[in-house]
Image (spheres, grey):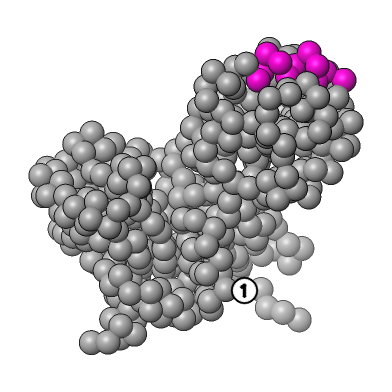
Amino acid sequence: MDIKGFVLAKAKEAREGARSLGKASSKQKNIALIKMAEALKKREKELIKENAKDISFAVKKGLSKSMIDRLTLTGKRINEMAQGLVEVAALPDPVGEVVRMWQRPNGMTVGKMRVPIGVIGIIYESRPNVTADATSLCLKAGNAVVLRGGSEAINSNRAIVKILRDVAKKEGLHEGVVTFIDIPDREAVMEMLKLEGIVDLIIPRGGEGLIRAVTENSRIPVLKHYKGVCHVFVDRDADLQMAQDICFNAKVQRPGTCNAMETMLIDKKIAKNFLPDMAARFNKAGVIMKGCPETRKILRDIDSVKEEDYYNEYLDLVLNVRIVRDIDEAMEHIAKYSSAHSDSIVTRDYAKGMRFLREVDSSAVFINASTRLNDGYQFGLGAEIGISTDKIHARGPMGLEELTCTKFIVLGNGQIRE
């Protein structure tokens, strides 16, 4: 079978899986997820053996230590992957929830009900845990999933999918609830993106290059998770110790994430009081700072920030620092350079905080809190499939509700249109 036929067959199998899930109860889905978790732990040795093949190939290919670390499965990581399935099983099932009802003058009742999207294609890189995470969220929300992981983790992903499919079949679900395109050729992705009418939604997870390539070639709606160029603005009315703690956390706690701060904006009224202590703390943590001309008058030993730096998602201990006149200039900067992911203001001024919430157009906007908190688990969603920077359908952390859509339901007693 050629690549086109192979991908089409996998997608059609997923469509059958979606129909199977449409008949499944919450209890059946939850039991399947719990059994999947147990099977992953039980077959730990098998997973580690297959993962070793990927690690060996990665070493020969000369992949970075950080990439190899992301690829590696250990007993601890497999246990965490399994625990994620159990946690999703414990979440409320969004399918079938009636979110609103109203009555019309003719007596009929109209409502909106949450229903699955259908078949979701997920294209991702590196981390094998995404295979289980994505499957659990899609399954709980009633969706079948077509997975296409990166070639660097193909053996690990193939083993995980086999375990999940075995359990699905034993628990009375169609195996197509989770399918995996295990062809590393890029043509497989291109064929997958043509399957409108079979695959309902594509979610790419990975670098900006992958996401742009998927968006440019897909005939299917794409939910984009673009880069995170995130800001914290320290207002003149901020509690400076709080501001220090928030900025430090936003940059240092885990710099390689999409919700880490990349540019720190400082009100000029407090810059001389705030920057020296903040810089000392950053220096101790190994942060490399780049500053605007006004910043470099205070921090004379840092490099100059360039215009293009403000667009960078460093994903590293590198930080742009800019002094601004006031909140208006801060918001102008964010409007120009932000990727509309996560932006925060530190202030004790209620009116300015409310302005920032209203006027900054990002997926999550914070007052007196770190951008690192833009996360499904931190928001109480229980889990997420990613953070959408789109505005249509879903924006911000995508939990179970965001993996459903709604349909209208009408309850009548003989009404007709006159």
Q: Look at the image and tell me whether residue 316 can be seen.
A: yes
Say above or below: 127 vs 212: above
Q: Which residue is mark 1?
A: 414
Task: Determine the residue positioned at 49% across, 49% down.
Answer: 386
Instruction: Give the quarter of the image for residue 108.
Output: bottom right
Q: Residues within 10 Å of mark 1 (few under 14, many from 20)?
A: few
Return the x and y of residue 132 as percentages of the image width and height: 30, 51
Return the x and y of residue 56 as percentages of the image width and height: 19, 52
Stretch of the chain drawn in magenta: 269-279
> Does 276 lie within the magenta span?
yes
Relative depth, front residue between 154 and 67 = 67
Return the x and y of residue 177 as percentages of the image width and height: 30, 64
Return the x and y of residue 410 as percentages of the image width and height: 60, 66
Task: Determine the residue positioned at 60% across, 65% down.
Answer: 408
Task: Determine the residue positioned at 46% across, 56% down.
Answer: 205
- Give the quadrant of the C terminus: bottom right
The amino acid pointed to by label 1 is Gly
Q: Magenta: predominant secondary structure element? A: helix
Q: Look at the image and tell me whether residue 251 can be seen.
A: no
Say above or below: 151 vs 86: below
Relative depth, front residue between 247 and 370 = 247
Task: Determine the residue positioned at 35% across, 47% down.
Answer: 64
Per the image, label 1 sits on a secondary structure element best described as: loop
In this rendering, position of residue 275 left or right of residue 2? right
- Give the quadrant of the N terminus: bottom left
Relative depth, front residue between 226 and 32 = 226
